[in-house]
Image: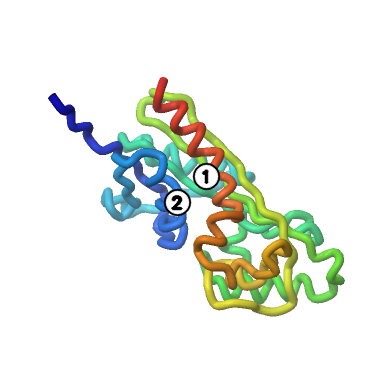
Amino acid sequence: MNIVREPLKIVLASRNQHKIKELYTFLSQVDSTIEILSLDDIGFLGDIEENGTTFEANALIKAQAVAALGYIGIADDSGLSVDALDGAPGVYSARYAGGHGDDHKNNMLLLENMKDVPDEKRTAQFVSVIACAFPDNSHAPIVCRGTCPGTILHAYRGNGGFGYDPLFYYAPLEKTYAEMTPDEKNQISHRANAMHLFSAAFKKELQK
């Protein structure tokens, strides 16, 4: 007798379609029965206040907000950390220029703040933290961090990606994030590195 297992429903605490697509690529490899939903898919119309001071705190806040609704919640909090700017824009990456998600204004402000920084000091890293929270605290929360080192350019290069991708140069491939193919980016990105760690931890937790 074959037992048909119900799909494991997971809600990604995001409306960012770029992030959802990237996360789906990895999560669908964890378990073929996983059904991945967005906030819109479950009718969540409100905003989740991200008032943490670290990527880890904000990722957990979002994941726990979903778990409180009875779903397994997974959230990513990510951003750019520039050494010459003491780690800025950091957790404020999406709203660096004031409004939320205005990539062009954020990039222009970054270039303005970096205009006097010489090439050798334009080092930075992208950071991604993936957090998972379970309904009724049935499992311990999972938090995994991934990073990718790079350099901030003086001008845009490439038409792909989103956010700070056109300014973030990754030396080993001699490309910005915005010049990479999706496959290239999924091999080396901060989110990919976080997801590799998360996938292993998530599988282990589900087996308990």
For the residues bearing labels 1 and 2, Cβ distance under 8 angstroms:
yes
Q: Position of residue 149 (x, y in %)?
A: 71, 56
Mark 2 Cα shell of 10 Å, populated few (<14), some (14-19), many (≥20): many
> What amino acid type is highlighted by mark number 2?
Leu
**Does dot 2 land on a helix, a strand or a loop?**
helix
Taking the spot 40% from the left edge, 27% from the top edge, the residue there is 206
User: Which residue is disc 2 drawn over?
Assistant: 23
Colour basis: rainbow
Mark 1 Cα shell of 10 Å, populated few (<14), some (14-19), many (≥20): many
Which label belongs to residue 12?
Answer: none
Q: Would residue 98 be seen by someone viewing this image from the given angle?
A: no
Q: Is residue 140 left or right of residue 87?
A: left
Q: Quadrant of residue 189?
A: bottom right
Taking the spot 48% from the left edge, 38% from the top edge, the residue there is 199
Which residue is nearer to you in this view: 36 or 16? 36
> What amino acid type is highlighted by mark number 1?
Met
Q: Is residue 6 left or right of residue 128?
A: left
